[in-house]
């Protein structure tokens, strides 16, 4: 008798980070997995991954539960942006409801280096307030959805870099640069210099793909208002694609094996 072929493991990758795309590239063509990458849809024309993909939300926790059940998802990897706290919380709740294993692929936060002048705050309202009353030239390296708290601080000049041209006016007066990362140190140093920026506002995204502005600010001696990551309920997490693959193949992370 010949044995039946092993059915591939159905994996949902919640995307929104460079790490998610790296995981998709690592998993493509592996017969052990039937994976789909889900984008939230906040970026137009996202980079097409080498595996099946979808765009859009799920409709809250209940919608995600329905999707996981309908698609017979066996494992979920949360590789969203570190500031996508709501999606991460929904994934935790939905996976718990269905007893589906969940692993977060979460890059480590940035660490201060010699020369860094960070002003750490807990949210974007506090970040806007930290700019002070004196007019400043501000680079907002925080994406499009978190600009509103700065609108009432009109004394500042704002430079905003966005992936896509917005379809509606921004909530504040700002100059825009439309560009898609990753960005490099030389380019970000030139941008900050050309626009005579004297303070940077950034999210603690971690990783390498968004770190150029932090390195450029360090070299130029500029202060950085660093917004700390939002709270996400406790979950199992790793920092590398290799650890995710090990978990998918063997059901455990190096930390669980005592490595």
Image: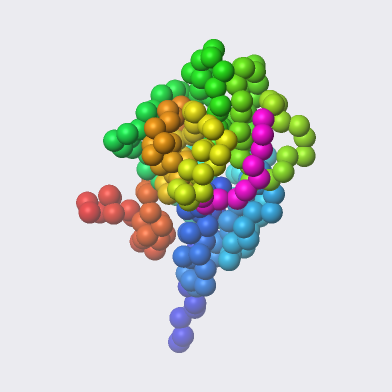
In the rendered image of this protein, does residue 108 appear above or below residue 29?
A: above
Residue at the far bottom in the pictured view: 1
Magenta segment's dominant SS is: loop
Image quadrant holding the N terminus, namely: bottom left
147 lies left or right of 222: right
Q: Is residue 37 left or right of residue 208?
A: right
- The answer to whether residue 38 is visible is yes
> Residue 230 location, x and y as percent?
47, 30
| Looking at the image, residue 252 lies above or below residue 28 | above
The C terminus lies in quadrant: bottom left
Q: Which residue corresponds to the image point at 52% horizontal and 57% vertical from the top-left?
A: 21
Q: Is residue 97 magenta?
A: no
Indicate the position of residue 5 as horizontal and vertical percent values. 49, 77
Residue 128 x/y as whole percent: 54, 20
Q: What segment carries the magenta color?
A: 174-183
Task: Tell me if 37 is positioned left or right of 231 in this view.
Answer: right
> Which residue: 46% across, 85% down?
2
Please give the name of the residue rendered at 57% of the width and 18% of the height, measured from the top-left corner. Answer: 135
List the single residue furthest toward the top: 133
User: Residue at point 46% right, 23% down?
Assistant: 122
Residue 89 in sight here: no
Tell me if residue 180 is in the magenta stretch: yes
- Give the image quarter of residue 235: top left
Query: Residue 213: x, y in percent?
Result: 47, 41
Which color scheme is applied? rainbow
Question: Looking at the image, which residue sits at the far left?
Answer: 258
């Amino acid at each position: 008798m010949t044995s039946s072929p092993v059915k591939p493991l159905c994996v949902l990758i919640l995307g929104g980070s460079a790490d998610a795309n790296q995981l998709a590239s690592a998993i493509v063509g592996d017969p052990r997995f039937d994976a789909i990458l889900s984008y939230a849809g906040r970026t137009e024309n996202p980079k097409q991954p080498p595996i099946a993909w979808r765009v859009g939300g799920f409709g809250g926790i209940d919608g995600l539960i329905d999707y996981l059940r309908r698609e017979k998802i066996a494992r979920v990897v949360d590789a969203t942006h570190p500031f996508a706290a709501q999606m991460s919380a929904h994934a935790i709740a939905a996976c718990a409801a269905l007893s589906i294993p969940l692993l977060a692929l979460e890059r480590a936060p940035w660490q201060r280096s010699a020369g860094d002048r960070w002003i750490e705050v807990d949210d974007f309202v506090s970040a806007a307030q930290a700019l002070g009353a004196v007019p400043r030239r501000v680079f907002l390296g925080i994406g499009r959805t978190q600009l509103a708290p700065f609108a009432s601080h009109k004394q500042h000049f704002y430079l905003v870099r966005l992936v896509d041209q917005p379809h509606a006016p921004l909530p504040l007066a700002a100059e825009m640069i439309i560009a898609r990362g990753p960005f490099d140190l030389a380019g970000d140093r030139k941008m900050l210099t050309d626009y005579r920026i004297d303070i940077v506002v950034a999210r603690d995204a971690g990783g390498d793909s968004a770190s150029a502005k932090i390195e450029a600010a360090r070299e130029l001696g500029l202060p950085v208002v660093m917004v700390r990551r939002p709270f996400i309920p406790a979950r199992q997490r790793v920092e590398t694609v290799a650890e995710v693959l090990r978990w998918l193949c063997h059901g455990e992370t190096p930390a669980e094996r005592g490595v």
